[in-house]
Image (cartoon, rainbow, N blue to C red):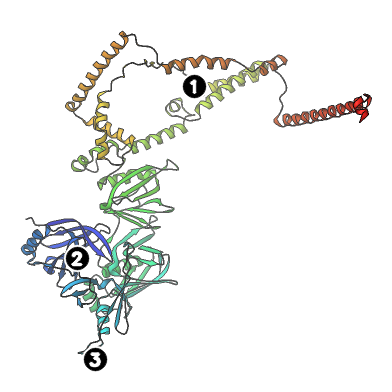
Amino acid sequence: MGDTLEFNDIYQEVKGSWNDGRLRFSKQNVVYKSSKTGKVDSVSAADLNHAQWRRVCLGHGIKLATASGHVYKYDGFRDTDFEKISEFFKTNYSVELTEKDMCVKGWNWGTAKFSGPLLAFDVNDNTAFEIPLSNVSQCATGKNEVTLEFHQNDDAEVSLMEVRFYVPPSLTDERQDPVEAFAQNVLSKADVIQATGDAVCIFKELQCLTPRGRYDIRIYPTFLHLHGKTFDYKIPYTTVLRLFLLPHKDQRQMFFVISLDPPIKQGQTRYHFLILLFSKEEEISLTLNMSEEDVERRFEGKLSKNMAGSLYEMVSRVMKALVNRKITVPGNFQGHSGAQCITCSYKASSGLLYPLERGFIYVHKPPVHLRFEEISCVNFARGTTTTRSFDFEIETKQGNQYTFSSIEREEYGKLFDFVNAKKLNIKNRGFKEGMKGKIDEYSDSDEDQHDAYLERMKAEGKIREEGNDSDESESESDESFNPGEEDEDIAEEFDSNASASDSSDDGDDSEDESAKKKKAKKAKVVKEKKERKPRKEKKQKEAGGPKRPMSAYMLWLNSSRERIKGENPGISITEISKKAGEMWRGLGKEDKEEWEIKAGEAKKQYEKAKKEFKESGGGGVSASSSKKEAKKPAKKEDKKRKPAGVEKDKERGGNDSFKSREFIETSEESSSESDHKKKSKRKKKKESEEEEEAASTPPTSEEESD
């Protein structure tokens, strides 16, 4: 058996939610690290005095108790782990791992036992359930009842709100009320914040960015009290995960960031970070509300009774001593401007991204902290609006993606070197990505590595500079490409011809000289148009002929495509071809020889089949190609045909004066009105003629009889 035992996917219950992590047993201590928060719980081996092995909902669990009264519970073990853990405890900790059965009868009456920070409810000497008293937020008493209310956890799908205990009256001791005794035992260990006593110190009117406003911060021995005009917050020191002290980019201000888990709540809003903003020039003299002996005994030289200095230094020093956690500051990273941060945008707000020694932190709206160990990969992406900036994307192992956009192009080299030095997986590294393992193991992070994106951005910058200077020199204009270049050339040629014709018509010598000068100037700019090479005619496919054979690479790709998809789930078609090309280039001669032999055999079969096809009288053009050829002359004839109206206009004379659109519309309206009047006159004339004709004709014999 080794010196350590390590277990992955071990769960710890936190206010009704299961947090996974890693557990390690060593000779010196027991260490558990949460995957969600990165918080580390360390229990010294000398403090362990009790260990239990129990059957729980997630397999099997271990309950560890220390001499100081703390209890730690970890679940997710297998049944087969019991023997090796028990032997390890006996050998290194001198503690026996005992098996304890849980009560599963479902009875709701039993005995309540207070053991350290736990309230255990036992039925027939077997534990039915346990309540961590640190999760209790309030305790209320009735006549024979005690009600416990609990802190809520946003990560838990189902939360336990309250539990009620019926406490029967005591028959032995009438002087002590059993309900009050039960409530006192709960409140002595419960996480109920009560501002009793005086504050250690008070900081007045500090500027707070999240939650926004100005707050008085009162420092108590066990919690922090934020007192504002609208809201009050009480923050226990046990909920503080990390402390950060970050310099602003202007070098005149400082951020002091407090990471909280669980977060402070205001309605439906959750504040996972408390961010204070200080000016470096602001000074303060601080006196602690404690005697010098108490300060020395409590803080062991970390603080003194009377202190003076910058306000941010005093706040960070006091918080560090009370919370007993290290303060994280930026590492060796320096951006293009010399600052230790990068200006960027996250979501809709602009802020600052700080590369730290073990992660990234973004302030301030919304604050984001990402540890390197929870980062799956990073990606450098082209900016969506302009090429003068780029985006920095971070993808976590849980599948979340954070995009920090609008980063200046000059910051790319510094940020890439930093990410590379920290050995983070870069998503769009190109060919080097396939050799990532070798680079991490055998090469130095400061070595020059090929970066496709960096080279592309340099090339674009060079092209842009050459495009701006294209009017000054011919060589630079030839190397760069300007989208409007061809149009400018055409316009310049047209103008030069026009000036030549004008100058030839005009007889003044001065105009001739000026036209010649213009010609000479424009001759420098106008380029000689290269004659277009005739397109190569495509080989027409023979109808019914044999199919051309595949190359060695294509044969290898068809057999390896499914394997590439399996090794890289979610990969796109373009990335498959890119990856396959890298893999093919990396194959040795012996591996390629197998596929080249297959390709050679396929080629021989193709040539043989082609020969037989031609001997049998094949070789005709396919139907599709013949149809295309039939269509071509018809198109040319259609182009040659001209409408009859155009030819008639040419016969009448093509030099008619130009008519505007308004004139044409008005003329059409007037002509239509005149046509309408003519028609109405003709109709009236016809009606009058019919009347006269009817009057002049004599009636018939039938009409007379009627």
- Name the side, left or right, on which 67 lies relative to 279: left
x, y percent for residue 387: 42, 40
User: Nearest the camera: 687 or 296?
Assistant: 687
Residue labelled with disc 3: 175
Which of 519/537 is in front? 537
Label 3 secondary element: loop
Q: Residue furthest bottom?
A: 175
- As shown in the figure, which amino acid type bears the numbered disc 2? Lys
Neighbour tally class for label 3: few under 14, some 14-19, many 20 plus, Cα within 10 Å:
few
Residue 183 percent across, percent down from the top left: 27, 81
Q: Residue 295: image x %, image y %?
A: 25, 76
Q: Quadrant of the C terminus?
A: top right
674, above or below 312, in the image: above
Q: Nearer the viewer, mark 3 or mark 1?
A: 3
In this picture, is 548 found above or below 565? Answer: above
Circle on res. 73: 2
Q: CA distance from mark 2 to mark 3?
A: 38 Å
Residue drawn at x 49%, y 21% is 527
Upstream in sequence: badge 1 or badge 2: 2
Q: In the rendering, which numbered label is found on residue 527?
A: 1
Please tell me which of labels 2 and 3 falls first in the chain.
2
Query: Residue 26 location in percent, x, y?
Result: 12, 60
Mark 2 Cα-neighbour bin, 10 Å: few <14, some 14–19, many ≥20: some
